[in-house]
Image (tube, rainbow, N blue to C red):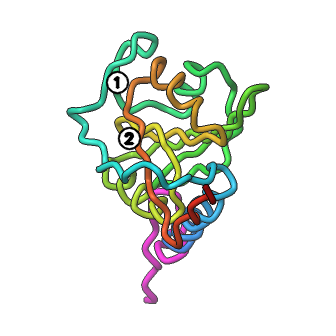
Amino acid sequence: MPQQPQRGRTGRTLPAARLIRGATLAASVALLPLVTACSGGEEDVSAPGDPSTISAAPAAGVVAPAKVEVIANLTGCKPKIRIDADELRQGLCHTEKVDYLITTFPAEEYKQSWLDSAAGYGGKYLVGSRWIVSAKEPEMLEQFRTKLGGTIQQLRGIGPSPAPSAP
């Protein structure tokens, strides 16, 4: 009797599910430069956030892993879910002031992998316990931090530094 292919939680065969997850993660990283602002390179690279250093935010009440929808509600938007995969969920928020992405992860190691990949693009990110917020206007991250908690991390992109300006 021929052996049935193994199936994952979604009912897909495991190689297909892995391929979809890989493509989803690659698409997320590829879209990152479109969403984040260019870094001026003045600031140092921050070390990845240690969960014990994450600050509490009065509006959030608790700093715990949250759903995209919960974080979006705390920042005043209704997200459009762009990615819903096993490794991450990502929602786009569009407001009059700023567009931003909220990405949540089922485990810290997925968040760290995402940050490692994003380091090549640079930019500022608000990082919490199994979630990240990235905005086209990085100055908005401080306002989000007061509502959500977390820490703001500056990642330095790879490539040449901007040329110094003429005196």
Dominant secondary structure, magenta: loop
Neighbor class of circle 1 (other Cα within 10 Å; few <14, some 14-19, many 20+) is some
Residue sticking out furthest to the bottom: 1
In the image, 68: left or right of 8?
right
Query: Quadrant of residue 81 in the image?
Result: top right
Residue under the image location 59 percent in, 21 percent down: 75
Residue under the image location 29 percent in, 50 percent down: 47
Q: Is residue 160 above or below residue 106?
A: below
Q: Quadrant of the C terminus?
A: bottom right
Ranked by sequence position, the earlier of labels 2 and 1 is 1
Residue sticking out furthest to the right: 96
Number of dots carrying numbers: 2
Neighbor class of circle 2 (other Cα within 10 Å; few <14, some 14-19, many 20+) is many
- Label 2, label 1: how many angstroms apart (C-alpha)? 10 Å
The amino acid pointed to by label 1 is Val
Q: Is residue 8 magenta?
A: yes
Q: Which residue is mark 1?
A: 63
The amino acid pointed to by label 2 is Arg
> Element type at marker 1?
loop
Q: Is residue 39 above or below residue 71?
A: below
Using the image, tell me which numbered label, if any, was put on residue 114: none
> Element type at marker 2?
loop
Q: Which residue is mark 2?
A: 130
Span colored in magenta: 1-17
Rendered location of residue 140, percent (x, y) = 59, 29
Q: Is residue 114 magenta?
A: no
Q: Quadrant of the N terminus?
A: bottom left
Rendered location of residue 126, percent (x, y) = 46, 37
Rendered location of residue 4, percent (x, y) = 46, 79
In the image, 130: left or right of 77?
left
